[in-house]
Amino acid sequence: MSPRGETRTEGPGDAFGRSISLPGRIRSLPALRLAALWEAFLVAAGSLRQNKLRTGLTLIGIIVGVTAVIAVVTIIKGLDQTVASTFSSQGSTVFTISKRPQVITSREDFIKFNKRKDVIREDAEAVFRACTACWRTGIAANSFEIAKHGDQKFEGVRLRAIMPAAMFDIDGVAIDIGRLWTESESAAARDICVVGPDIVTNLFPDLPLDRAIGQDIWTGGHKYTIIGVLQPLGKIFGASRDNVIYIPYANFEKNFGAHNSLVVFVQTETAPQLEQAEDQARAIMRSRRGKTFRDEDDGFALETQDVFLNLYTSATSNIYIVTIGVSAISLVVGGIVVMNIMLVSVTERTKEIGIRKAVGARRKDILTQFLIEAVTVTAIGGVLGVLSGFGVAWLIALLIGFPLLFSVWSAVLGVSMSSIVGVVSGLWPAWRAAKLDPIEALRSE
Amino acid sequence: MTETAVATSQTSSEVIGKPELPANGKADLLIVMSNLWKTYDMGAEKVHALHGVSFEVKRGDYLAITGPSGSGKSTLMNLIGCLDTPSQGEYWLNGKNVAEMDDDDLARIRNQEVGFVFQTFNLLARATALHNVELPLIYGGVPGAKRKEMAREALSAVDLTDRMMHRPNELSGGQRQRVAIARALVNHPSILLADEPTGALDTATSYDIMNLFERLHDDGNTIILVTHEHDIAARAHRIISIRDGLIEKDERIR
């Protein structure tokens, strides 16, 4: 060991008033931090490996918490997506004009809306003629019926009368087997229908879908011949959207009489035209209802499908917050487990802390070391928790039947949340370690 | 290393920001302690572990501090090693007044200026000899490759070239103490401070370790031994005897 000698023999003037042997001071700060961080990480990894049972228990605590949060968030996002795609199947180019809005929140409103004039075929025709921003217009009337074929009976079927055939398009449904009706068939009020696949599977359980074409079914006391089967739309919250029977509107008028109030569907060619079309249609309808600018009430409801989404969002957002909050409690419990174990770890390694301090570890070096240990275990727990959370969500999605969205966002959320738990719960034990007196620490066994 | 250290030595003292002892011709003085007190507050009564200790240590000296247990010997060692600060008095180590430093400054001084050798070795049990020796360099911010090189150099200086990758439990007591000495020397500190370095070793091994200290002293290291064993203290060049918190005797024997 001779370098010491070189440093010392620099002449009398250098000894005092100068610090000569301080290599650490001249190193760049980032290098210092990196080496100390890496050391801290190695120590953390070693200590976690050393105490397998303890590490395992801590991991379970964190995994359970993260799993709960990730599963809940993933399921909620899946449900949201299902609802959003269902209600926006008509796209953002469609609005409706009806007597009553789709959502009524009070009895007073209900009474008020019932006093309004019915929306009739002539209203639709007027909008179609005068609205320049509108592209396609159609009318629809709904009623709930029972469908029958022979002994087979299917309840809760939606009978939907539409005109013109473009309404299929506006509704966002497409033909799978057979054909749609022609304009002449529609005008002739023929007893024909296009059905959702559920109708066939329920009324003709032994028949393949394509053999359903030409079969007769009874609904609302009238007989209809199936000419087409629609592509399936699937379920929303377990309820099928494929139990529908489409018939021409003229036939509906002939068989069931004039429906008291219709829904007028208006579609624009592009989404940006929607607002202009809504304004024009509103003006046309208001003049038909004899409303002046002084009247606050339109006398009809003009709505896009957003109303459902807004209702859904406002109804569920609070439930979501509570659910996520409750599942986050398990993460807090995990944090307490981590804190407890870190405290034990600090006590066990008092001697080691003393040694490190004696050779020059500063408070922040020790603090970082224990924080890294806490964050390492919680981050690993976070990753495993995200995986098992996705797994749980996948299982539940499989049972309920909705599409699953594995988002990077929630994975990042899970890992960062658990890391934050690590920092928060590791902070106090790490601080205790950092401020240990080196003399006391060295003395401990 | 020497060139860089000298080139930046002007600014490095400003980093600490403490007043410095003027260069007054005592340039070869490494340690200046004047009227050092250490008082412990034991509830109602105050216990004076040291009352007014003053001495100086030259660069390259080989000093033994002896005294019975309870004499204040350990307290003095903690102060010299910058593990603790005095209640009163001044302590200049290598031109810096360490008496009023805060925890982090003390840690830096321990890292750069003091090399500890303990009775019970105090090695990290799970780390290899090489890693143990690297530890001060890690906290000193020495980059990886340079660190390994310096640690190997220090280990070969204590004749442990072939034991670098062994853990403490795979080494004999004497070998462990030599790892500890390598760790103490790796940062080229101003003083090598050994607290009962042979207390846990058998006679033959103790003899080897004391020979090693002698060699290190011959290489120019300043060594301070704290011991209650007279034959160990007799190996030093100067003996300071402590009793009841005061210097009882300060004699040069070589």
Image (tube, coloured by chain):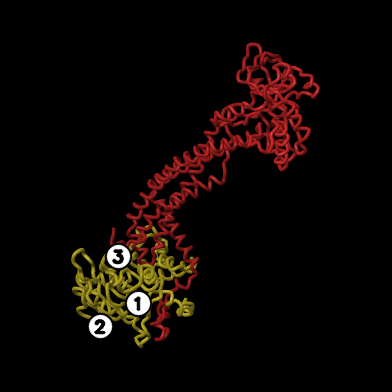
Chain colours: A red, B yellow
Chain where mark 3 sits? A
Secondary element at tag 3: helix
Residue underneath mark 3: A439
Q: In this view, does B161 lie above or below A338?
A: below
Secondary element at tag 1: strand
Residue underneath mark 1: B97
Total labels: the figure holds 3
Residue A73 image point, x, y percent: 52, 41
Residue underneath mark 2: B252
Q: Which amino acid does label 3 sit on?
A: Ile
The foreground one among B20 and A183 is A183
Q: Residue at x 32, y 76 (%)?
A: B223
Labels 3, 2: front one: 3
The foreground one among B203 and A306 is A306
Q: Which residue lies furthest to the right in this view?
A: A184
Left or right: A39, with B208 as reference point: right
- Tell me which corner region of the image, top left, top right, bottom left or bottom right, holds residue B35: bottom left
The tag earlier along the polypeptide, 1 or 2, is: 1
Residue B32 image point, x, y percent: 31, 80
Q: Residue at x 35, y 84 (%)?
A: B28
